[in-house]
Image (cartoon, rainbow, N blue to C red):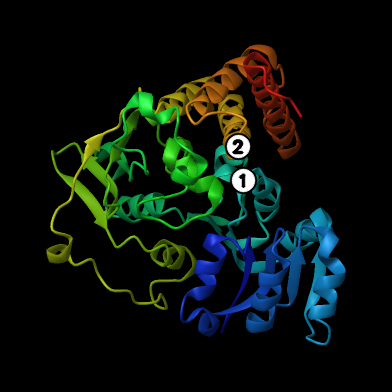
Amino acid sequence: MKKELTILGSTGSIGTTALSIENINEHFSIHALVAGNDYNLLIKQAIKFKPKYAVLFNEDYYEYLKSNLFGSGIKIKIGQEGVMDITSDTVDVVLSAISGSDGILPTYNCINNTAVLAIANKESIVTAGNLLFDKNLNKSTKILPVDSEHSALSKLLGSVKKKNIRKLVITASGGPFLDKKNDELEFVSVEESLKHPTWKMGNKITIDSATLINKGLELIEATYLFEIKHELIDILVHPESLIHGIISLKDGTSMAMMADADMRIPISNALFTELNSPKYGNLSLEKVGKLTFKSLDNDKFPSVKLARQALDIGPIGVISYNASSEVAVQSFILGKIKFTEIFGIIENSVANIHKNVHIQNVDNILSILKINSKAKNVAENLVKELLIDKGSKVD
């Protein structure tokens, strides 16, 4: 019997990769495909996969969506209300792959409405992890990671006892600027930042990889997923991106999870059971030739160090880290700030909100979203101040 699947963010890189898995139609009936703005791709996906619902966040394209799906039997929902309606439906599996903070509320709304919540949206766990993993709130939903690193660690952790663990190691490709000198980073362009050496992803996460913000987010994510302190998690630069996670044990041995850089593998690990999971080819080490590793340069890429500082502050710190990184990266994309100024916006935002914001109650989603909004405002004001200092025009 097929399971019902909802994909939040079906037109993004994770959503389209999930739908490209060869036998997905054999094991899943699509309950809903949810997209933000890409109505053309959503229409194509809906016609091919025949979901019960096609949901578009942007209400401006409702008539276009309606006319193109007329007679298909597919029901249409739009806007924030439509997204919340669909995440309130009971289904077997939800793949949460909406980009950025927009995915927080829909992901949280899936709790107890789905048996399995496969999360690719880092921001949901970083910002609302204390709620998602609260057993008093989450009584029936199993949360599984879709990031390749957390998927690898999750598999490895299944074969060891927690008391025997010395360290968890998250690997990082190092992004496109791994070999650049510190003083060269100030002048890198958006176009250069979007040339990831290994993965093909959306703009935000690709620049997050160039700054290593994504590793800061993954560090925070791992503390929630695996209930472990950040001091017991290391970040190791591994440019080939073939070892995705390592566990170092107290007996002096280490276990590594290796696979090709293919996002279908961690997506399949989250969506399918072992019995019906698609079969992929194994890594051919003789073709790889060599594997290289480097320590993380925290001076050149302070994102992980800032994430650790945010974790030491607590939930309000990590919420601010996430929110300010979104603002800073978007400001860089728009040409308002330099690449290296991204880090200062994050550092000052986290320090500012910790010092001046007195909303400490993070035991409900509305408070979390309020802090997230406030943190974005703080970061936006810092960007404006930076532009004023430069004598630039402020919109």
Mark 1 lies on a secondary structure that is helix
| Image quadrant in which you'd find residue 219 | top left
Of all residues, the one furthest to the bottom in this rendering is 71
Mark 1 Cα within 10 Å, few/some/many (few <14, many 20+)? some
Q: Which residue is mark 1?
A: 100
Q: Give the CA distance from mark 2 to mark 1.
A: 7 Å
Viewer-nearest residue: 143 or 71: 71
Residue visible at 57% across and 40% down?
A: 129
Mark 2 lies on a secondary structure that is helix
Amino acid at pointer 2: Glu
Q: Number of numbered discs present?
A: 2
Can residue 133 be seen here? no
Amino acid at pointer 1: Gly
Q: Which residue is mark 2?
A: 326
Report x, y in % for residue 232.
33, 31
**Image position of 12 with respect to 240: above or below:** below
Report x, y in % for residue 145.
47, 53
Q: Is residue 279 left or right of residue 188?
A: left
Q: Earlier in the sequence, mark 2 or mark 1?
A: 1
Q: Quadrant of the C terminus?
A: top right
Viewer-nearest residue: 154 or 323: 323
Q: Is residue 104 left or right of residue 176?
A: right
Residue visible at 87% across and 70% down?
A: 63
The disc label shown at residue 307, or none: none
Of all residues, the one furthest to the right in this rendering is 63
Viewer-nearest residue: 339 or 124: 339
Report x, y in % for residue 289.
13, 58
Report x, y in % for residue 76.
81, 72
Residue visible at 43% across and 40% down?
A: 210
Q: Look at the numbered discs 2 and 1 and tell me whether their residues touch, using CB distance below 8 Å.
A: yes
Mark 2 Cα within 10 Å, few/some/many (few <14, many 20+)? many
**Image position of 111 with respect to 115: above or below:** above
